[in-house]
Image (tube, rainbow, N blue to C red):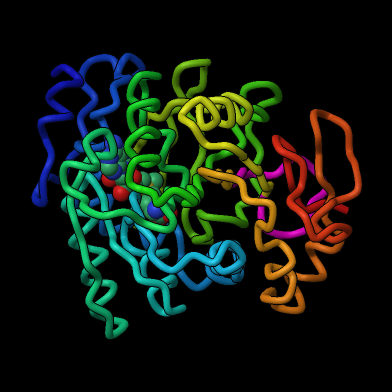
Amino acid sequence: MSSSSLQDDAGLQSFAQNYGDDPLAARESDLYRGEFVTGFVEKWDELIDWDARAESEGRFFIDVLRAHGKESVLDVATGTGFHSVRLTEAGFDVLSVDGSPAMLAKAFENGRKRGLILKTVQADWRELNRSIHGKYDAIICLGNSFTHLHDELDRRKALAEFYAALRHDGVLILDQRNYDEMLDHGFTSKHKYYYCGDQVTAEPEYIDDGLARFNYAFPDGSEYTLNMFPLRKNYVRRLMREAGFERVRTYGDFQETYESEPDFFIHVAEKSVTPNCHLRDRRSSLSGTRQRHLEKSVAIAGDALVPARLDSTPQCAADESVMRNGH
Ligand code: SAM
């Protein structure tokens, strides 16, 4: 069976993934439609473990959104609804979008269990503005989702659609695995962020410059795979700038206490940079713990470590600076 059969196998009731005769050749942006089959969607929350994930990322996204003064949020990679639910509970006005109807159905169910009615829209990022009307303060594309686009033109198209759905001073928050480390030095994981379920393994089966194929194994013996594109950090930053975002800050993981490379990067891309970018407000809105973490932050410009400007000046940190929590 060809990989297009996998793409066609979309919808709420598909159970088996099928990559055809050569799974390593399946490298299309539409693959996700047939990868997030019902069985995998039902397992997804075991993989991410909501409580452990909430603890590991803390208030990071809430703090960043508040620091930028944002209220309306488009969650374009809703998945099973983890961030839609958390941000709704925190008082943000969230619209939950995903290209997978099975994921959206699960997100809705998860919202109901918590007494929330999520507003959901099924849409592919590459045609987002056909389904989404109005402009949003912020877009989040989290959980290593952008990696599902295999073609550069699709990445550019999606970023252009995100850009168009934002208000003039909107912010896009998009995260990714640290593929640079995997491509250059091999795979390691602290298994601490994002995929927090302690009974589940999420590991690469295969990686080259155009494919990262991961295997997800669950305690009941079930296994699923995802074929993803291994995005390099600076490549994503460049694409964001070329899509029109004036400034991109990139954070590594969520906490200061790591000794090696972060597992994940989080890019915060601003559509327009204003002289007062709320960083002063950000400090005052942070919880004590996060503020202490940020006070120990370092900013990385290129490869050089320099003291974080976040704490030393009320103005925005330098354009193109890379922020991450460090020692
Ligand atoms: N954000 C969730 C999380 O962190 O648990 C879900 C992450 S899951 C890895 C990626 C999600 O992105 C899936 O729900 C998938 O359906 C969605 N997705 C992938 N490519 C997409 C596209 N081109 N348009 C819309 N949604 C897409």
In this picture, is 170 found above or below 204?
A: below
| Relative to 144, 81 lies left or right | left
Q: Which residues are magenta?
A: 253-266
Residue plotted at (16% across, 51% down)? 101
Q: Most prominent secondary structure in the magenta stretch?
A: loop
In percent of width and height, residue 75 lies at: 36, 56
Q: Which quadrant would residue 7 be assigned to in this image?
A: top left
| Viewer-side residue, 138 vs 182 | 138
Residue 263 within the magenta-colored segment of the rendering: yes
Q: Is residue 285 magenta?
A: no
The answer to whether residue 204 is above or below residue 41 is: above
Q: In the figure, 87 relative to 154: above or below?
A: below
- Relative placement, left or right, of 223 versus 200 is left
Residue at 70% x, 78% y: name it.
Answer: 287
Query: Within the image, what quadrant is residue 284 found in?
Result: bottom right
The residue at 38%/65% (across/down) is 72
What is the x, y in percent for residue 251? 67, 47
Q: Is residue 64 visible?
A: yes
Q: Which residue occupies the foreground of this view, 91 or 253?
A: 91
Q: Is residue 201 visible?
A: no
For the residue pair 76 and 68, the one nearer the viewer reads as 68
Q: As drawn, which residue projects farthest toward the bottom?
A: 115
